[in-house]
Image (tube, rainbow, N blue to C red):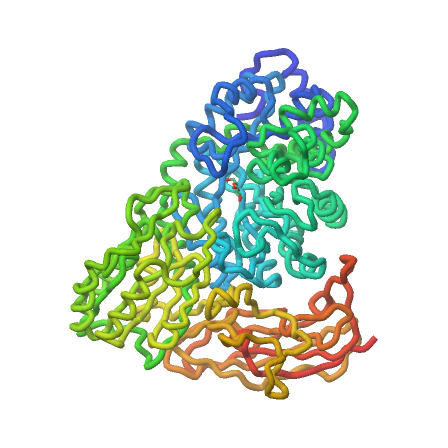
Amino acid sequence: MSFCTIPLKSTIKILILCFISNSLYSQMNSNDLIDKKVDSLLNLMTLEEKVGQMNLYNGFWDVTGPVPQEGSAEQKYEHLKKGWVGAMLSVRGVEQVREVQKVAVEESRLGIPLIFGFDVIHGYKTLSPIPLAESCSWDLEAIEKSARVAAIEASSVGLNWTFAPMVDISRDARWGRVMEGAGEDPFLGSQIAKARVKGFQGDDLSANNTLAATAKHFAAYGFIEAGREYNSVDIGTSTLYNTVLPPFKAAVDANVRSVMNSFNEINGIPVTASKFLQRDILKGKWNFNGFVVSDWASIWELINWGHAKDKREAAKLASTAGSDMDMEGYVYIEELVKLVNDGTVKESIVDDAVKRILRLKYELGLFDNPYKYCNESREKSTLYHKDHQEAALDIAKKSIVLLKNENNLLPLKKEGQKIALIGALASEKNSPLGSWRIASDDNTAISVLEGMQQYKDNSLVYEKGVDLTIGKTHFVEEVVINETDKSNFPKAIEAAKDADVVVMVLGEHGFQSGEARSRTQIDLPGLQQELLEEVYKANKNIVLVLNNGRPLAIEWADKHIPTIVEAWQLGSQTGNAVAQVLYGDYNPSGKLTMTFPRNVGQVPIYYNYKSTGRPINREGNVFWSHYIDSERTPLYAFGHGLSYTSFEYGNFKINGKTFNINDTVEVSVDVTNSGNYNGKEVVQLYIRDLFGSITRPVRELKGFELVELKKGETKTIQFKLDKSLLGFYNNEGEFIVEAGDFKVFVGGSSMTTLEKSFELIE
Ligand code: BGC
């Protein structure tokens, strides 16, 4: 259907359509053409209609934050009719989307179509693993595919815009939202940001099965103090430039169409009002031509921060700072027209924002067909499609990290064994979906129990041992953890006594991580630790399978339990993925992307820390950088992850000793599968710039390759290090490369000891 076939009520609409029709600009390239169309349309808009485009309303169903004022459905419909809404969030399903779009297109004066946004974080109905888990696959192709599948499903229900990927780097496992990111490293985080943007947006944004992506939360939300949700951030410029911003820059380079700002402040300025971040860096230095959407009511929250005294000031600060769209804050729609009319805010600021928003609407092809994503039969045949389930299973297996495997307890033998499966999470069909499953249906995950039941030639006994939660869980509700009822302990202990191998599935409920789910204790919640210790007394042959949305402090388990598998929350296909790994039908290949601490007191703990002035215990006295009650080393390091086979590294070479700053350093290493299974290894390369005008981390990931090796096979892996990898940002935000001594490390984790040196000269 072309836009011209949509019933138009007023003559003015016809005029507009002619004015912006393709024929008028048929000779131009598509970017110029869009700019011209946008300009033409802008010329016809009243100030109220322009400000309307900057207004994003939540639909009438899901709420993902507190609402500053009650926006009634009637009021929202009134505003839609007046053309005072640019986009909607959480309106979903073809029927609903069509209904709302119809109001905008057919009842408003100019008939400008709406964009429909939603938190499509790790799938829509079919859920892939939580993003932190996916990042542990280090498999960019699979990660891109996962986002592609999510886009296919979500676009089939009428949506065209996702609030993902979250590219916030975080080092703090107390923060519940680490589950939504790609871990602690800016290099890996940047690659994953690109892959996810590419997956969502595809090659053609105007296709009806792609979504405009959003890089969020700009910026530094992952560094909130003490991991307490929505808290302040206080980081230095070096961390901002070198750790926080690179994944956002990568997303912008990958043509992400929108960026969401965040709830935190930096240097006393809530970022929603930060001109420095939004105008100077994002839209200035990086030349970002998409638009900035506020986070949920974050413009209004400028008042709570004590930065704006009222809505009027909040609107002024946020709009001049470069926040283009107000999500459910009711601030722009109420204040911005007045501010422009009395000369406080320049109309050019509004025009710039509106152009960016309209540009996306043209890019999506909404002016040609505002209902292009609305097809019921496609919706029906797309959701939970078997291809999507297969893709979800594929990445779920790849996301699992084998943390420990003493005595080769894994893989399990496929027959003749008595297995006791213990833990409430083992039979969970809801928790593995995580807390960002708004659209997916409850209890649709395959549980670990169901997965293991498919291996029929062992005897399998299941005992939950202890309830993890008490009461009903629901989105936005907090789960209530069982702290008292141990009545099922004895049955689990009995089952363990009788088993050859005990598989225990323990960890966090899906609703214990995610937004607004910070924890001060990051051990096994409830009575699970106690259960683990009791079962261990009965049978030491335990395979501990962890389900969680953040690194956990499991020092006791590491000391006692022979085999530990990190299985996160793996989405719809959880049970199949876990069972295939436990039984060796998939050889685990994941590597951690966030450091596991020994205890919560070590947090924030990360691999790319600074040396400090007292890094080692040189003289045997107390005055060095350490704790007196704990090791300073992590429990499991970034990049760590085992396989059922083993890998050997040899023939590590650099193509010289001294290089000019403009040269490319070539590094190669042979990797051999020296064990008994075919398998995959993530070969990692780290550098250390020994002396810098800004001190450099002790290690920085600068390359990786996921390599598949048959038993006995050797492959040579090559890396190239050029200026872009050897340099860093100074405190003025300039990218510089300094001459000096470097070390290079290669291996299967950030703790690798294989090292070589070279020198860069000018
Ligand atoms: C979250 C965003 C999310 C938005 C819309 C906010 O509370 O911080 O990440 O996209 O809600 O649901």
Q: Which residue is drawn at 73% across and 35% down?
A: 320
| Quadrant assignment for the C terminus | bottom right
Viewer-nearest residue: 568 or 476: 476
Q: Which residue lies furthest to the right in this view?
A: 762
Q: Is residue 420 above or below residue 41?
A: below
Q: Residue furthest bottom?
A: 619
The image quadrant that residue 477 belongs to is: top left
Is 113 on the left-hand or right-hand side of 93? right
Q: In this view, does 449 lie above or below 621?
A: above
Counting the numbered discs, the total is 0
Q: Which residue is drawn at 33% across and 58% down?
A: 526
The image quadrant that residue 496 belongs to is: bottom left
Residue 381 appears at what percent x and percent y?
36, 39
Viewer-nearest residue: 389 or 492: 492
The image quadrant that residue 261 belongs to is: top right
Is 666 on the left-hand or right-hand side of 215? right
Residue 283 appears at what percent x and percent y?
73, 44
Is 352 on the left-hand or right-hand side of 208? right
Q: In this view, does 439 lie above or below 43?
A: below
Residue 443 appears at what percent x and percent y?
30, 46
Viewer-nearest residue: 278 or 559: 559
Res 388 seen here: no
Q: Residue at x 69, y 59 (%)?
A: 236
Residue 356 appears at what percent x and percent y?
68, 35
